[in-house]
Image: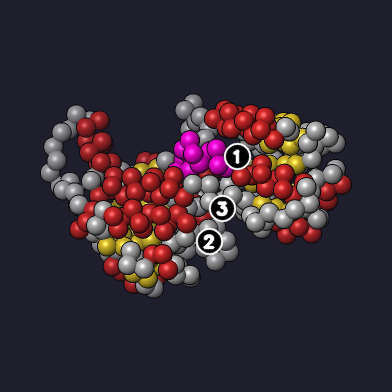
Amino acid sequence: MTKILMTSVRDDEQSAIDDFAKAHHIDIMVTTKECHPGTLPDLTDIDGLVIQQTSKIGGDAAFYHQLKDAGLKQIATRTAGYDMIEVDLAKKAGLAVTNVPAYSPRSVAEMALMQIFRLLRQTLAFDQRIANQDFRWAGLQSKEIHSVTVGIIGAGRIGGTLAKLLHALGAKVLAHDVQQREDLQGIVTYVSKAQLLRESDVISLHVDLNPTSVGLLTAKDFAQMKPESYLVNASRGPVINTDDLIVALENGPIAAVALDTVEGESAVFNHDLSTTGVPDSRIAKLLAMPNVLITPHVAFFTNIAVKNMVDIALQDTLTILTNQTSEHEI
């Protein structure tokens, strides 16, 4: 019987894992540990490997060759991002690498839309006042969404879904992407990055993490943004220079930001730090700022998305184990 190892398994994934194992008559071994050279169990009887994490595996060439020598043919990540895998080393060792590029674009798009509404309606500031039993609304006038311009950087599956939602609500939508989609004609206006920064009241980021997107927004970009503009990041943390962001939040032009992902999040997000405190000084500072809304990388975390991430990653694994080619191979 085919046996697959899944790492970093959460309780909410177990039902989908059990259903897939039963439907495909395979054995799935699970562990809560991440995939690193020192955390993997004996792989002698393991046919496939499925991971999910934001921290680097940290393996060298010898490690990936060890995986191959143990009988593995592939590594599947049940996430869209795959930067945690040393892909070049894996492929040189003869291992196929797959990801789940579209587990549920709507899950992330809906989260971004919610955060846009929260920023426009000043709910973060109202929550802070009400927590102190201050129920005044002076200075916190909101903006209706049909009266603003929203700029989307990265109008792919997720960004395109957000654009359609915003368009349906009457917002003017600008987009910047290296590829222009025909199905977004009449929904977005494609512009340069500089024009998008200048004209948008809200900017939402939906780009992949790759060498060209690291540091996509820095101080020079923030300086081009409209005064009192808002920023949403539901993509990956390193696309924003965090130090520059903090300065822009302190001194303008950014009025407030909603971050579902941030640099250094691996040591913080999905951990209980209630007794130890946040170890990352930049995240700690962002958390203390009154104009910052942080959620712990949960834009993907819906019933549909979790099931799709499990199912697609496992199906890709079976595809490669039967010497077929997956459409999701990196």
Q: Is residue 205 visible?
A: no
Q: Which residue is mark 2?
A: 214
Spatial CA distance of label 2 from label 3 is 19 Å
Give the residue drawn at x 61%, y 40%: 311
Amino acid identity at mark 3: Pro
Q: Secondary structure at mark 3?
A: loop
Of residues 158 and 269, the one drawn nearer to the viewer in this rendering: 158
**Residue situated in front as seen by the camera: 21 or 50:** 21
Highlighted magenta segment, given as a residue range: 296-309
Q: Position of residue 16 (x, y in %)?
A: 59, 32
Is residue 51 positioned above or below 220 on the image?
Answer: above
Q: What amino acid is at disc 2?
A: Val
| Label 3 vs 1, first from the N-terminus | 3
Q: Residue at x 45, y 54 (%)?
A: 158
Q: Residue at x 64, y 44 (%)?
A: 313
Would you name the residue on which mark 3 appears?
101
Q: Is residue 125 magenta?
A: no
* Drawn side of residue 281 relative to residue 145, left or right: right
Does the magenta-highlighted stretch encompass residue 306?
yes
Residue indicated by mark 1: 310
**Where is residue 77 shown, x and y percent of the image?**
64, 46
Of the two numbered discs 2 and 3 on the same chain, state the one appearing first in sequence: 3
Label 2, secondary structure: give it.
loop
Q: Dot 3 surroundings within 10 Å: few (below 14), some, or many (20 or more)?
A: some
